Image (cartoon, helix red, strand yellow):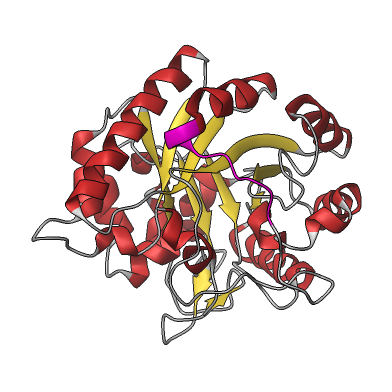
Amino acid sequence: MYSRRNFIKGAGALALGSVALSGKAASFLTPMEHHPVGLQLFTFFGIIDEDVKGTLTKIAGVGYKEIESAFSKKGGYYGMKPKEFKAMANGLGLSWVSHHVLGAQFKLPPGAKMPLGADGKPIVLPPVLNLRDNMQQVVDEVAEGGVKYLVCANSPTATLEEVKSTIAVLNKTGEAAKKAGIQFAYHNHDMEFKAVDGKVPYDLLLSETDAQNVKMELDLAWAVKAGKNPVEMFKAHPGRFPLWHVKDLDASRQNIQPVGGGTIDFKPIFAAAKSAGMKHFFVEHDMPKDAYASITASMGYLKNKLMV
């Protein structure tokens, strides 16, 4: 499976269960009624840069209302300044809620290759900003764009020294973001749940970062793949997870599927949205074969089965 984890792992790289619309189910759905559905634009990595406005227009046409931006081969914010991108998104009926940035300098993991672009050639990226080296610049740009959340997409956690360095970067960024009126958060893959010298990096990220300045964007599928129960995580750290990534996995837990197209039971997770402190969720599908088909299927499932 080629995913963002593989794409940015070296930088350190939701399904909703179906519910019968009975009176009891309706009460479960109450917290999610009319909740705007967001999309993580990494779903369109390698595509969106070919026609940013056209891509966003189609995304809005599917029914998405909020977006979370990610990496762009054009640099910056899909080749634009923050205010420019915000104006374009708003003009199409989209709210730019969150932006992803790397925690450390990007590099491909050993043996990995860049994904192919629309032209069939390996994607070539401009210099990618990261929090370790460009923290204040990133915070200032996101503040300029009026974005509510800045999210560290990935940061090195393969050794305890890397974990320690990542924690320092997260705390520093959390303080800077707070001063700028932005909420900072950390996005997980499954690697943070793999023990390093007897300690679990994600546990250290939770316990050794400021709980107010550093929230978590929980990628539910990656957490489940790692053997975690998101509901238990919410109970242990109530209010720490204001952002979610929503995608499904097949039975092998190796292949990402559109929302509703996999095997994970997300009904109890969404039922625990209040204890999680969830404010926004973003549908995501890492490197899909057909991004438009995927986000359309996901939206159909969300609207028809969960009535969000």
Position of 39 relative to 124 (above/below): above
Is residue 301 visible in the rendered structure shown here?
A: yes
Q: Is residue 236 visible?
A: no
The residue at 86%/35% (across/down) is 88
Answer with left or right where residue 296 lies relative to residue 283.
right
Q: Name the one closer to the observer, 38 or 13.
A: 13
Question: x, y (%) of residue 114?
Answer: 62, 69
Q: Which of 35 and 87 lies nearest the eye of the viewer? A: 87
At 70% from the left edge and 50% from the top edge, which residue is drawn? 72
108 lies left or right of 167:
right
Residue 201, compared with residue 84, is above or below; it is below
In magenta segment, residue 109: no
Q: Is residue 128 magenta?
A: yes
Q: Which residues are magenta?
A: 125-133
Rendering coords of residue 75 (x, y %): 72, 44
Q: Seen from this angle, which residue lies furthest left? A: 198
User: Furthest residue to the top?
Assistant: 179
Determine the image quadrant of residue 247: bottom right
Q: Camera-side residue: 152 or 112? A: 112
